[in-house]
Image (cartoon, rainbow, N blue to C red):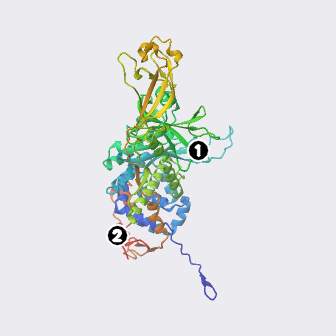
Amino acid sequence: MTSIADESVIIQSTSESVPSTPCWFGEVALMAAYLRKHGILTKISEHVHFARRRFGHYEVIDFVAVLFGYAISGEHTLEEFYERLRPFAVAFMAVFERDRLPSRSALSRFLAALTPEPVEALRTLFLNDLLKRRADVEPQPCGLSDRTGKLWKVFDIDGTREAARQRALPKGSPLPLPHRRLDGLCAPGYTGRKRGEVVRTRTTVLQAHSYQWLGSFGNRGNGEYRKELRRAVEAIQSYLRAHQLKDSCALLRLDGLYGTGAVLADLLGMPFVMRSKAYGLLDLPVVQTRLYLPADQQFTLPESALVRTLYDCPDVPVGPNGQHYRLVVATHLKGSKKQKIGVERDGLIYELFLTKMPQEAFTASDVVALYLHRGSFETALSDEEREQDPDRWCSHAACGQEAWQIVSQWVWNLRLELGHQLEPDPVRTTEFAPALPPVHKEATNSPSSSQGYGPAAVALPWKAGRFSGQDFALQPDGTLRCPAGQSLVAHERRGEADGSLRVVYAASIRSCRPCPLREQCQWQGSTTAKPRQVSVLLHPLVVGSAPLLWRDWSRRHHRRACKQLLRSQRVEVQAEQGLTANPEPVPVLLSRAQRAHSRLDFQERFARNARAPTASRVTIRLFGVPEGFATSLGLATA
């Protein structure tokens, strides 16, 4: 030992190697204890079966334990993770009740050889574990309360991708065909802002109030988005059944990727809101007619100067089967930059929002606001990428990569649950949209109302045998067509005392004078000096007046509470001698099956790497853990 001393500081050094405990080891020990308490490790051993040669004495649970530790650690690569773990390999496997740590090469072979059956079994356990221990139960219901007081559960479905770089290979007739390691995992596709030649896409499902992952489904290239969407809907239905909720209480927010009529059948009738890219809907007569009438509302965000004018079309045929859905058309002026979203027509940018949300509970402005609020899902994906990065390449096989991503989402949900136990804060309530003001009692010339307008209505017959307003049909070009085939053009708009908006249409006197139907059309018949006028009334929609209330928890606070606590505190790891210091060799009695090297059943395979009762005792001491929190996890306290 050498030392450097001055008046107040002594610095000593020694050649003895004493590795420091990884900062994440305490969280691994705590989470492994939590998994043991709830029987998750036992369920994985019993239900996730996979047998293959060259696994040595290891079983599925041994490799899953390594993946759990890798996801918790946040190390950039498996190589770095193994480097930090090597001095504490015995203690690491002991917290999972296993003996030896699989090598990196054994883990790589395991992930490369995985088949879909064990991956789906692991996915089922992941979802069942989430649904068994619910975080958003009474008396703290989370969700979205609409303007009628109904509570909705909002789910976000979106895709994320990871691109891979591939170097150019020389080509020539004498060279063999190239073999890419990622051929089974990636394919050419849309890379977005990420650099690479090949890409892998996965669809993720997030509960928007508790920020829990419900699933991850990946495929090569751009993925199979309709197949993945159906699986996401199945996971959401399982969630609703576990919470004893109807499908009508769910609200699915979908990315514009799904904005076609073809995918609506995959939603199984569940309410949704999505941005549509079927711009052919703008050419439908029912939509064109609505666009020429006054707008329902205007919408803008506080952080943006963009003002959207909203037109609510409640009954529009969509898709190959012509099913009717609600369509909200948002328009705004074309800017100086090219717009990435929407279609341009006559200097206006048109955006389409398809939904199945009822008009009496959500105004057109509410629909657009709820969809644009989907941006909070992007922050959750960003947190996931920064803290765990599940899209990094853990295996060059599709099933191995899927298993890693399932475990990564599992760790995310466990951190949320442990954070709620450590700091049980109440649900926070946010006024997503204010209450609607009462309908104006005085006349107004406002171009739009606070709740939007209902279908256009015209006057009833005022004299027997005469044409009424119902005989003048609205046209896609914004005019009225009279029984004689002439057009009436809107020339006046005025507000009524009950909050309605009156639009007055008038014909040309040159068309009315020679008209053979003038006696049936005008009050004074042929002596009338003015052209025919027709009023179209737009009555305010009957919408609940309650505010939209968004109830959720903090996205980051609970998930990081346990992690930050344990990583800022000291962790002591001690390995003591077993019950027998120098055990005498005991003759092993072999069975005939063992003598013949017959195949082992899964229980025998599991026992080969199980931790023996006589193994060295490992003591892990976690500092700074509150006593009540430790007791709830079944941990011994000093």
Give percent across and percent down for residue 51.
41, 51
Say above or below: 532 vs 264: above
Visible residue check, residue 325 = yes
Give percent across and percent down for residue 432.
44, 50
Sequence-earlier tag: 2 or 1: 1
Residue 171 placement: quadrant: top right
Residue that label 1 marks: 192
**Could you tell me the amino acid type at mark 1?**
Gly
- Of the 4 image quadrants, the one containing the N terminus is bottom right
Residue at the spot 47% in from the left edge and 65% down from the top edge: 563
Residue 631 numbered mark, or none: 2
Depth check: give the residue in front, 361 or 271.
Answer: 361
Q: Secondary structure at mark 2?
A: helix
Q: Secondary structure at mark 1?
A: loop
Residue at the spot 43% in from the left edge and 52% down from the top edge: 431
Locate residue 542 relative to residue 297 in the image: left or right. left
- Of the 4 image quadrants, the one containing the C terminus is bottom left
Q: Hey, which residue is sitting farthest bottom in the picture?
A: 7
Say above or below: 454 vs 614: above
Depth check: give the residue in front, 584 or 248.
Answer: 248
Give percent across and percent down for residue 408.
47, 55
**Distance in Å between CA atoms under marks 2 and 1:** 48 Å
**Could you tell me the amino acid type at mark 2?**
Thr
Depth check: give the residue in front, 193 or 592.
Answer: 193
